[in-house]
Image (cartoon, helix red, strand yellow):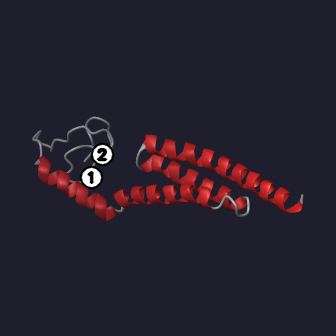
Amino acid sequence: MYCSNCGEKLIDDSVFCHACGAEVHDGEGKKTNAFEQTSRTNVDMAYSGQESKGTMYVVFGWILFGLTFAFFLCQAWLPIVCGIAAIVMGYFIYIYRSKPHGIVLMALALFGTIFSVALGHLVKMIIYRSLYF
């Protein structure tokens, strides 16, 4: 069955189109039982992994963002790798979960990576000067 509004293929026994949100009617023009169909769709999404995939991107994205600051005194490449990975997770959040949340994580990861690398170099320079001069 396809959505009469946007033409997207519908999940069996859907109440609303997952693409455009239009209400779905059966072939006779009757509305289906909204409570039963909505709860079934939520259960199907949970078991298909769609909801957990978005949550996984959020958790890993913010952990990687935090690691960019945790590794600022390590090798310069380590905060860069964590920052790039956080930007990628932000992009996946943007695609699969929430556009504003993805944009915020990508912007903060970029800023955090630059700040962490600069702070690491500054601290290493201060330590080097205090030890050898």
Please tell me which residue lies in front, 42 or 99. Answer: 99
Amino acid under disc 1: Ile
Tell which circle, 2 or 1, labels the residue nearer the N-terminal end. Answer: 1
User: Which residue is outermost to the right?
Assistant: 133
Point 41% across, 55% down: residue: 54
- Against 2, residue 67 (above or below) is below
Quarter of image, res 8: top left
Q: Where is residue 115 in the image (x, y as percent from the top left)?
A: 66, 47
Point 43% across, 60% down: residue: 56
Q: What element carries label 1?
A: loop
Q: Where is residue 78 in the image (x, y as percent from the top left)?
A: 68, 61
Q: Residue 42 carries which label?
A: none
Point 50% across, 55% down: residue: 62
Residue highlighted by disc 1:
11
From the viewer's perspective, tell me whether residue 83 is left or right of residue 51: right
Point 13% across, 47% down: residue: 34
- Against 113, residue 78 (above or below) is below
Query: Residues under labels 2 and 1: Cα distance?
Result: 8 Å
Query: Closer to the camera: disc 2 or disc 1?
Result: 2
Asked if marks 2 and 1 touch (Cβ < 8 Å), the reply is yes
Number of labelled discs?
2
- Against 46, residue 90 (above or below) is above
Q: What is the crowding at mark 2: few (fewer than 14 residues within 10 Å), some, or many (at least 20)? A: some
Q: Position of residue 76 (x, y in %)?
A: 73, 58
Quarter of image, res 73: bottom right
User: Which residue is outermost to the top?
Assistant: 5
Residue highlighted by disc 2:
18
